[in-house]
Every structure is written in structure tokens, then in C-alpha cells.
Amino acid sequence: MHFKSNVVKSFIQPPKANLIFHKTDEEIELIREACLLVSKVLTHVGANLRPGMTGAQLDKEAEELIRDHQAAPAFKGYKGYPSTLCVSINDVVVHGIPKEEEFKEGDVVSVDCGVLLNGYFGDAAYTFALGEVNEKTMHLLRTTKTSLYKGIEQATHGKRLGDVSFAIQNFVEKEHNYSVVRELVGHGIGKSLHEDPEVPNYGKRGNGILLRDGLVIAIEPMINLGEKEIKQSKDGWTISTRDHKPSAHYEHTIAVRKTKADILSDHVMIEAAVDGNPNLQMVEALEEVPIFP
């Protein structure tokens, strides 16, 4: 999940020191196992999401599935967060607390999940289109999804973190005129849910830390249809767009490698479930990316 700034309370505190842990091959495989369990949870969401269902119901089923695999929900209880999933609907960017409110035809539903399995964390997110979502919003989802892979494409040994950030921002803001949320970022992940470095979705090419083989990070574009400004609700968690226009969020956990990034989470299984669910629209990428799974 994300970063806590002076204006937004979130799951991650500002780092006290720049401590970056590069993972061994064995550790990366353990993180992959955790990420694949997250992907199974999101696949369950993709198979079952429908109008009339509630976030609270999804959350209960997700926790049961995680615990059935001898794992623990990573978000529940973290900094006081009350739920297993973040379920963010329409103009909610992230950190939506699952409620008894029923999903409706035309909603876009972003679901973020994390687990702790065998001492390592996994994290991923996917935004689902429920029924007949309007074309303007669908294009936002397609753009956000594609921007994730634009960023991942840059996450190779010898590049700079700013290359990842720039690729996302340039595609979203310059090519498609949407807005990158500034206060919320991706993060390192491993034995802790949030590790250094922070991974912004905006930046300059050639800036930031040097990416080295074995760095594991969660890349997660959070993109608004309208303006970039956000607001926090009185519950202390829910982050919404200030102009009430829709937002989208997609996330993968990846390992930096020498030739191309290794994607540890799996959206393919999620999309197979979406394809089999008549209540959901498939979110297609706008263009093929060389490392597209």
C-alpha cells in the first residue's frame, strides 16, 4: 500500500532511514508465494463480484480464504486498519473500508489485498468494472492498467527509480491527460509490508536510486479522471478525489532483474475469472507492452 505524508494518513510511515534490502533468490520465491495467494484472493473477487453484493461480504470471504492457506491478512489491524481488503468504489482512490453498501451496475471497484505468508508479505490490487461502465471511465481504467506495465518495463538492473516513475506519469498525464495522485506511492516489500524505497508514480528520468538486481517493490499507479487533488474522510482512512470524479488503481509486486522485471503477482488468473463473470467488463490494455504477461 502507500505513504503517509503531512496531509494523508495511510498504511506507511515516512522512513526514518534509507534502508533498502535486496532479496536473495530464495526470498524472492517466498514473496512470490505470498503474492500468488493475494492473486488468488483477487481472482475470487473477480469470479464473484456482482450487483447487490457488499464489500463487507467480499472482505469476510477474503479473510477466510487467506486463513485457509495458513496465512494472515496483512492489512487487518495494521496501524488500526479494520479490514482484510481495501475496497474503493468510483471516486474513492484507495483505503476504502468494506461496508454493507451494495455494489451497483456501473460501479468501478478497486480491491487491494496483502497477505503475510511464511514470514514474507505479498501485495497487489485490481480495479474491476461492474456491468455497463461508461466509456470515459473505462478508458481511465485501460490507461491506468497500461501505465502499470509502462513502469514495470523500466524496472531493470542499472535503471533509476525515476525512470519507472517518469514512464507512468508521462503515459498518464502527457499522452492521456489524466492525473497522477502525488501523496500516495508504491513501496518496497519483503519481511515488512512497507520497506524503502518509496515508489512515486511521477518523476524525472535518470533521477532516484539506482535499481539493482534483487530489489522487490510494489508499483501501483493511482490515477484520477479529473484533477490530482484528494481528500481524506472522517474515518481516517478513505481517500477520495476532491472533484468526485472516478479514480483507478492497479498494482503488481515485482523483482528487479538484469534483463526484465520479474512480476511476482498474477493478474492473468484474475482476468480469467473476470472473463467468466457476466457481471464484469474486461479491462483491456491500450497497447501491448513487451513484458506484458
Image (tube, rainbow, N blue to C red):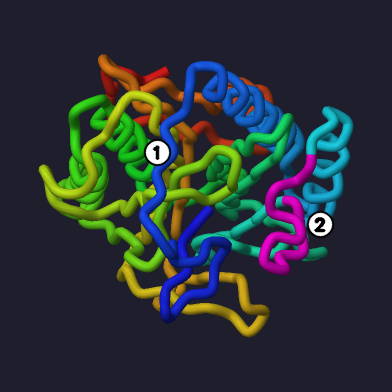
Query: Is residue 259 positioned above or below 254 on the image?
Result: above
- Report which quarter residue 55 is drawn in: bottom right
- The image position of residue 26, as x and y in percent, is 56, 17
Residue shown at the point (53%, 74%) measured from the top left: 9
Query: Is residue 257 positioned above or below 45 on the image?
Result: above
- In the rendered image, which residue does mark 1 sit on? 145
Residue shown at the point (79%, 47%) measured from the top left: 58
The residue under label 2 is which amino acid type?
Ala
Residue shown at the point (60%, 48%) measured from the top left: 112
- Answer whether labels 2 and 1 touch (C-beta < 8 Å): no
The residue under label 1 is which amino acid type?
Lys
What segment is highlighted magenta in the picture? 72-84
Query: Who is closer to the viewer here, 184 or 45?
Result: 184
Query: Who is closer to the viewer here, 256 or 108?
Result: 256
- In the rendered image, which residue does mark 2 sit on? 56
Using a 10 Å C-alpha cutoff, classify the residue at mark 1 as few (fewer than 14 neighbours), some (14 to 19) or many (20 or more).
Answer: many
